[in-house]
Image (tube, helix red, strand yellow):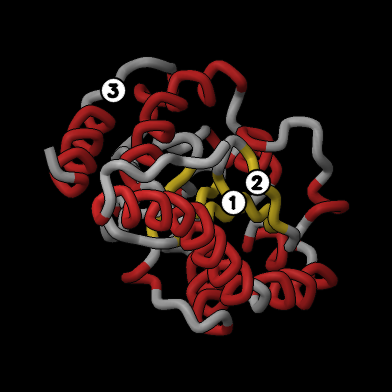
């Protein structure tokens, strides 16, 4: 099954999901959107009012700010994958509860596995907590870390820049680091592939050659 078909399958499963109480108050599920070959994945916290209405992630005011942030980093929204840790809107935009995060975890894990993005950007502390549960976002925002073979970048949620204007310039500065971080991930990927290629080529040319250890 291709990544595109897998993402469609996951989307269909989310649309019918009744694993937690959030299902009973939703208008639309918000599985996420973006191409199957996206190099970078953004994970927010949960859908808001407009996301629940349209079934798409980050379409309210925070979404408009996210679009501006992507542009400032030289990224196009249609070339990144955007989703949330929970796929249904929490009442009154409250924080997702642990049971709700757990209920949605399988969907997000499968999206990550099939997309296999070079970089994952977490937007907000609940998203960050999936990968860095003991970290404080105020201390690590804008910095990258390898977690289980995945390059993770913790960022403030765009909504934080709207509610706390003093954070806006920090968020903008953090996003401008993304091109360099993406290049770091690409370089690391190439470095991991290179030794394997070097070992295979002599073996094809001379089957009797012994390997060193």
Q: Nearer the viewer, mark 3 or mark 1?
A: 1
Q: Is residue 189 above or below residue 176?
A: above
Q: CB of mark 2 within 8 Å of CB of mark 1?
A: yes
For label 1, the residue is 151
Front residue of 201/65: it is 201
Front residue of 54/135: it is 135
What is the distance, in whole Å, between disc 3 and disc 1 at their CAs? Answer: 29 Å
Pick whichever of labels 2 and 3 is earlier in the sequence: 3
Q: Residue at x 65, y 46 (%)?
A: 146
> Residue 141 got which mark?
none
Q: Quadrant of residue 87?
A: top left
For label 3, the residue is 17
Q: Residues within 10 Å of mark 3 (few under 14, many from 20)?
A: some
Disc 1 is placed on an element classified as strand
Residue 50 image point, x, y percent: 41, 55
Residue 150 image point, x, y percent: 55, 45
* Residue 166 shows up from this direction: yes
Disc 3 is placed on an element classified as loop
Q: Residue at x 77, y 77 (%)?
A: 169
């Amino acid at each position: 099954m291709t990544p595109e078909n897998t993402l469609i399958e996951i989307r269909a499963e989310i649309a019918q999901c009744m694993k937690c109480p959030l299902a009973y108050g939703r208008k639309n599920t918000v599985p996420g959107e973006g191409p199957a070959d996206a190099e970078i994945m953004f994970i927010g916290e949960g859908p808001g009012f407009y996301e629940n209405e349209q079934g798409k992630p980050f379409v309210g005011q925070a979404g408009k700010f996210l679009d501006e942030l992507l542009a400032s980093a030289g990224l196009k929204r249609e070339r990144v994958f955007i989703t949330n840790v929970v796929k249904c809107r929490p009442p009154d935009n409250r924080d997702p509860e642990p049971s709700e995060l757990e209920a949605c975890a399988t969907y997000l894990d499968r999206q990550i596995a099939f997309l296999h993005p070079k970089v994952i950007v977490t937007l907000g502390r609940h998203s960050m907590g999936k990968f860095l549960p003991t970290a404080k976002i105020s201390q690590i925002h804008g910095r990258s870390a390898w977690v289980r073979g995945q390059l993770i970048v913790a960022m403030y949620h765009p909504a934080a820049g709207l509610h706390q204007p003093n954070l806006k310039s920090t968020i903008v500065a953090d996003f401008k680091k993304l091109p360099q971080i993406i290049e770091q991930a690409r370089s690391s990927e190439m470095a991991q592939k290179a030794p394997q290629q070097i070992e295979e080529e002599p073996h094809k040319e001379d089957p009797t050659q012994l390997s060193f250890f």
